[in-house]
Amino acid sequence: MAEKPAEKPAEKPFVPFFKRTVIEPVTHEIKTLAVVGAGTMGHGIAQLIACAGLTVRLTDVDQAVLDQAVQQATASVEKLVAKGQLEGQALENLKQYLSTTTDLAAAVAGTDLVIEAVPEDMALKQAVFRQLDQHCLPQTILASNTSALSIDELAGVVSNRQRVLGLHFFNPVALMPLVEIIAGLTTPPELLDAVMDFAEGLGKTPVVAKNVPGFIVNRVARNFYGEALRMLEENVASVEVLDAIMRETAGFKMGPFELMDLIGIDVNYAVTQSVYEASFHEGRFKPHPLQRTMVENGLLGRKTGAGFYHYDG
Amino acid sequence: MMDNQIPGATTWHVACVASDKNHLDCLAEAFTHPNTRVDTFYIPDETSMPNFSGSPHKVVVEWLDGSEDMKFEGLSFMSGLMDKKTLFLSASLAFLPSELAYVLPNPAMLVGFDPIPFLFQKRTTTVAPALQTSLRTQRTLRSFFEKIEMPVHWIQETPGMVMPRIYAMLANEAAFAVQHGIATVKDIDTAMTLGTNYPMGPLAWADKVGLRVVYTILQYCWETYRDDRYRPSLLLYRLMGAGQTFYQYHRHQHEQAEAASRLSVVGSGSSDDDDL
């Protein structure tokens, strides 16, 4: 484009709606946050944020749960500092930046980002999102820490669904480096970018995924277990040998059966089932009958002392 | 480590046979040991079969993975010329040891094995006897693996063996995810290594093993079980057809996305127009 007619005034070219991205850059500065739900994930996330030096208000319906969460977070940070995994500053940051309240409206007022971390129950999460819709600023980003539920089903209950996304931390939050950022159908790319920067600022490695059953990790990992269960059924080898093959010939830290025992046969089965149901029975995600039989029998893995292996004590 | 070695007396003469030079190198490296003497035979197609008559090899380690004809004809040709007591270790990713043993004059002499660990310089493997394999063959092979200090696991034959089939299924699911725009190649591999502690992202694994190998494992499982869960993803098939890798595709996608974002930003000036 060497020459342009000089007399014509500059006109904005027509851009179809699906290509209209950022015209005027929107800045999403994330400095003040709230975490809703002070269970294992909730207080882990709040702890991580406070240690990074950002203001975070942790809220829960139960004051006792909040008190316990602060105790656990403090103990966890003390341990990490003692081990040298966090600097001494982290403990001061935790005391300075983490506050708690049972008043959800007060907790979320004026925040840039709210992370919902209540139990994995769609009706409960939707109720929280309706409250957030009422009490948050219109530009506050609303994130759900879910590992299995649909982000779009949450976006559907708020008036501005463009500010909803998923933020999937892994347990234990302080140690697991991965965060899955989940885009619903209406989540704009610049929101993903802002949350990506935020996650990197916390020292995590974020990845972006569309809102599909299981997102990335819980979806792609399904057949690590599913294929192994089918091989066991086919009598290819014993549980011990199949595990040993995966460890020794491929370098996995744990084989599929010892890993299922660690996760809990019931938890693993529930994830497989939910991905299978949510994908309208995609054959690749089909659970194995042995999973159900083991759950029925109470063989849930390490936590019950027996699963694919026996555990003493 | 090798104190039970009797010099000279226990040397196993091994012939490594492969249709891919890298595969051949990996086999040779894995079977090289003070107790073995390894000869290598590169056989790129069925017209270049060496003459094995009177060959001194006690064990043939074979990884021919061209066409079906090549595998069966190659095995039939080699075994026809060699001593009837020669042991065959056959790569059985997309074939069952039983159907491979069928073409041998002495089917009792063949056992299948998984060659993939050797590509990653892991000196261990999984072996599966055919239905025809004699107990004597199994005993001899057990002592062979002991002599060369290679730990192995014995399993019942199954399509794709154990580890390659599980990894191929992970790679296929990851390929579907890329194909459906769920996440990028790099993000999927990052998620699987950091989120579940996998030793390697499934797509990087597929690139390293070779998409043709991954595809044939899935295709063979699909044909054998007639179960839709093994259906290879279209993206895997496309990349294999183009002779490309997942990471090449990733770079290509990334470049295209950048070009598209330059297109869609309104009023950003015309300096980029020449690139488009």
Image (cartoon, helix red, strand yellow):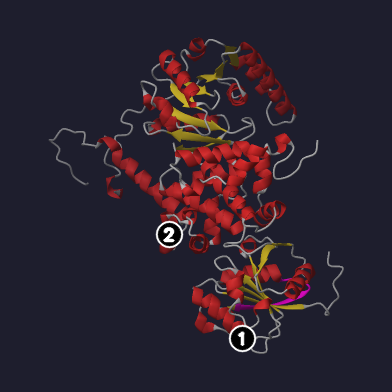
> In what element is the residue under mark 1?
helix
* Closer to the eye: label 1 or 2: 1
Residue in the foreground of this view, choosing between A299 and A106: A299
Residue A294 image position (x, y, % from top left): 65, 41
User: Mark 1 is on which residue type?
Assistant: Gly
Residue at 37 percent of width and 31 percent of height: A188
**Farthest residue toward the left?**
A7
Residue A108 image position (x, y, % from top left): 49, 15
Contact flag, marks 1 and 2 (Cβ < 8 Å): no
Range of the magenta residues?
B32-41
Residue pointed to by mark 2: B237
Q: Quadrant of the N terminus of chain B?
A: bottom right
The answer to whether marks 1 and 2 sit on the same chain is: yes
In the rendered view, would you say A35 is above or below A20? above
User: Mark 2 is on which residue type?
Assistant: Tyr
In the rendered view, would you say B167 is above or below A296? below
Does the magenta-highlighted stretch encompass residue B33?
Answer: yes
Residue in the foreground of this view, choosing between B39 and A81: B39
> In what element is the residue under mark 2?
helix
Give the left or right position of residue A150, taking residue A177 as reference: left
Residue in the foreground of this view, choosing between B13 and A128: A128
Does the magenta-highlighted stretch encompass residue B101?
Answer: no
In the rendered view, would you say B119 is above or below A44? below
Residue A245 image position (x, y, % from top left): 68, 56
Circle 1 marks a residue in which chain?
A: B
